[in-house]
Amino acid sequence: MSIVRQQASIATLAVSGSRVAGLIREMVFAFFFGAGPAVDAFIAAFRIPNLLRDLFAEGALSTSFVTVFSKKITEEGDDAAYKLGNQVFTFILMVMGSLTLLGIIFSPTLVHLIASGFTHDKFLYTVWLNRLLFPFILFVSLAAIAMGMLNSKGKFALPQSASTFFNLTSIVAGLTLAYLLSPHMMRDLLFSFFHHQPRPVPSWQEITRGLTGMALGTLLGGVVQWLVQMPALWKLGFRPRWNSTFSDDGFRKVMRLTLPAILGGAAVQVNVLINTHFASYLADGSIAWLNYAFRLMQFPIGIFGVAVATATTPAIARYAALKDVENFKKTLRESTQMTLFLCIPSALGLILLAEPILGLIYQHGRFSAFDTTQAAHALMAYAVGLSSYALIKIYQPAFLVHNDARTPMILSLISIFLNLLVNWFLIFVLHFQHWGLALGTSVVALWNGFMLIFLFRKKVVGIWSAILLREITKIILAAVFSTGLGWFAYHELFGLMGDRLILQRLLLVFIPIGLTTLFYYFVCSWMKITEVTLVREFVFSKFRSK
């Protein structure tokens, strides 16, 4: 198995733990707060700091930094690379600290831009939460740079697990603070749930106090996500120091790549923000339904797409620095195939089993069956673009490695414009509900991913070979056949036992998924798809090593 595939496997395991913790966090959130106007306010308030994190910290700056930092290690050694790291850390403290202050001051204007459909108490509470959550961007930016440094040094398990610490801290601290701020609401819900009694409807004040506690827990989780990585960097020889000279050629290169990369990576994140704006004019709960669906779709993207991209970016940066064209093409080809091998069946599974999966995960406490149905419609629409979301995370850094930030930037700007047009048409002309926004985002993501791949094929010939296309065709056929059998199994089981009890819901989800996975494995083995052999060899090697 190639080193990139080994590192991708390690990253996948680490990210899996993080995504599971994130899913538990969402389950807890749904249980206690469900989907309603206050939850819409929380999600909208978190959009701006979360968008800045995705675009700037964990997106553009992290990608361009890893690209330059990896080359710096290869060409000049650790000392020069760590000097660059300190300059970027200092830059983050200065810029993100200033952005945080500005965000707090101008929060009413920002909230009006992202959710102009909010009025009265809903608007005021969104402003309050936005101000409370804005410092989150500073801490996760520092965490993202620490993660990039560790990844560049071949360390994937801890940095990819750092968000697990964020999620666990958010859950424990958030619930503790929510209980302290709104004890009656929390106690009443738990009592009614365990005693199977009708749930009392809490007041607006009780819900908002509880959500304020969750916001404080989220902020504390961002601090922990950064601090947990620093001891590992210390062991590798990095010593954090204030360095505001910004004289390093590598730093200037990071900055040159970052601004175009911000625009280049903006499409998916900004389109989610655009969805929030349009959804603020729809029924209460629309933003929450879209959020729960998008969070669940992020589970396979994070486990598969982000994990593969995390291992791929430092590797292709090294090969580009060494001018090793063949290994560069081989790495990108393998990463593309592995991503599609994992994401295509995941997308089909989410489309076919959206409602039972969401019902099992979220339909407890204040999250109703109606909420499940509405979120399922959004999940099916989002899943259409799942594979493209993952491939975008691989091919955008490939452009940056070739010092071309302009192409993904232009494509991203066009995608944002297209998404605005599509959303306006779907909501105000066709009068679709919230799921139309999710569908529009997926369609635009498919276009963005296709164009990135099409244009990169002209830049580097030989990645999308006939062999790769043949393997992808086999993967699609195997995924369609396997998920079709899983869907048939679900309907047969549903007809036999229904889904009123939690055990029935468990069986309705895990038996079809288990059968689909088994079918997929055997069909791919019969078709001699390369990834199955590599996964089998990796698993067996782990057992032999024990």
Image (spheres, rainbow, N blue to C red):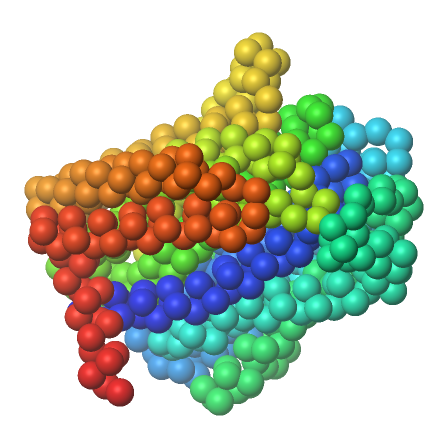
338 left or right, relative to 58: left
| Front residue of 113 and 517 | 517
Q: Do we see residue 15 in this rendering?
A: yes
Nearer to us in this view, 125 or 147: 125
Image coordinates of residue 65 in percent, x first then y, are 45, 63
Circle count: 0
Rendered residue at 22%/71% (across/down): 538
Q: Position of residue 189 (x, y in %)?
A: 79, 53
Question: What residue is drawn where x is 33% and y is 53%?
Answer: 514
Residue 420: where, in percent of width, then height?
A: 55, 24
Task: Determine the image quadrant of residue 483.
Answer: top left
Above or below — where is 348 with respect to 436?
A: below
Q: Is residue 403 visible?
A: no
Q: Quadrant of the N terminus?
A: bottom left
Q: Position of residue 355 (x, y in %)?
A: 50, 37
Q: Is residue 341 left or right of residue 224?
A: left
Depth order, front residue of 532/48: 532
Please state which of residues 532 and 246 is positioned toward the viewer in this rendering: 532
In the displayed structure, 421 sits above or below 244; it is above
Residue 230 vertical position relative to residue 129 in the rendered view, above or below: below
Position of the C terminus by quadrant? bottom left
As drawn, the residue found furthest toward the front would be 496
- The residue sitting at 79% across, 67% down in the picture is 176
The structure residue drawn at horizontal position 26% and vertical position 67%, both measured from the top left corner, is 4
